[in-house]
Amino acid sequence: RKQMGTEKVKINWKSLSLQAAAVLLLAVLLASAFNHFSHKEAIPGPVQAACEEVKAPYGTQTRLELSDGTTVYLNAGSTLQFPVSFAGSDSRRVKLTGEGFFSVAKNNDKPFLVDVSSLEIAVTGTRFNVNAYSNSRDITITLVEGAVNLLKMTGNGITRLATMKPNEVASYD
């Protein structure tokens, strides 16, 4: 039987330290390059807020509260698109398809705008109903409280069609 001897291995710590430093430096450089080239530059211009879309299933009514405190009741088969937050915007704009009852939180500095097809409804704090299903030609607005401005979006800009008072009903086709 042969007995294996134990040999002492001399470790060159200086060389090992230099190799470890080189690997660490390479990792830092690669991470920095990745961060530099994968970072998206800010696009100049207005910031688009993240948007949500809520659909009321058929046979139901859906209640939601927007970030500004406005309450919306969507009737069956209706859809509301709105930003998660109105912060950083000069208005509070939503888009409605179908029927919704709005109880708008008052804010004179930021008008509340409801886009319905080519019609825009502008308010600052009021309660009203909009019926604008896509399968109907008519858009009907019923004002319960406050005031509503009906605006038509045209190629030349925006034209005011009417200003509604409480208990008035307007129909637009």
Image: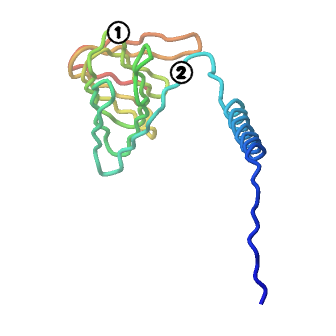
The quadrant in which residue 88 appears is top left
**Left of 77 or right of it: where is 37?**
right
The quadrant in which residue 99 appears is top left
Secondary structure beneath disc 1?
A: loop
Q: What residue type is labelled 1?
A: Asp
Residue 109's disc is: 1
- Tell me the CA gap for discs 1 and 2: 19 Å
Q: Picture coordinates of residue 48 (x, y %)?
A: 53, 25
**Quarter of the N terminus within the rendering:** bottom right
**Left of 40 or right of it: where is 90?**
left
Q: Picture coordinates of residue 77 (x, y %)?
A: 38, 45
Q: Residues within 10 Å of mark 1 (few under 14, many from 20)?
A: few
Instruction: Work out whether residue 101 or residue 124 is closer to the camera in this orientation and state it.
Output: 124
Protein image colouring: rainbow
Q: Which amino acid does label 2 sit on?
A: Val
Q: Name the residue under label 2.
A: 47
Q: Earlier in the sequence, mark 1 or mark 2?
A: 2
Q: How crowded is mark 2: few (under 14 residues within 10 Å), some or many (20 or more)?
A: few
Q: Picture coordinates of residue 97 (x, y %)?
A: 42, 36
Q: Residue furthest bottom?
A: 1
Instruction: Work out whether residue 120 or residue 91 is closer to the camera in this orientation and state it.
Output: 91
- Which residue occupies 38% across, 16% down? 150
- Which residue occupies 41% across, 31% down? 84
Q: Picture coordinates of residue 49 (x, y %)?
A: 48, 27
Instruction: Work out whether residue 41 or residue 1 is closer to the camera in this orientation and state it.
Output: 1
**Compared to 23, does 102 lie above or below?**
above
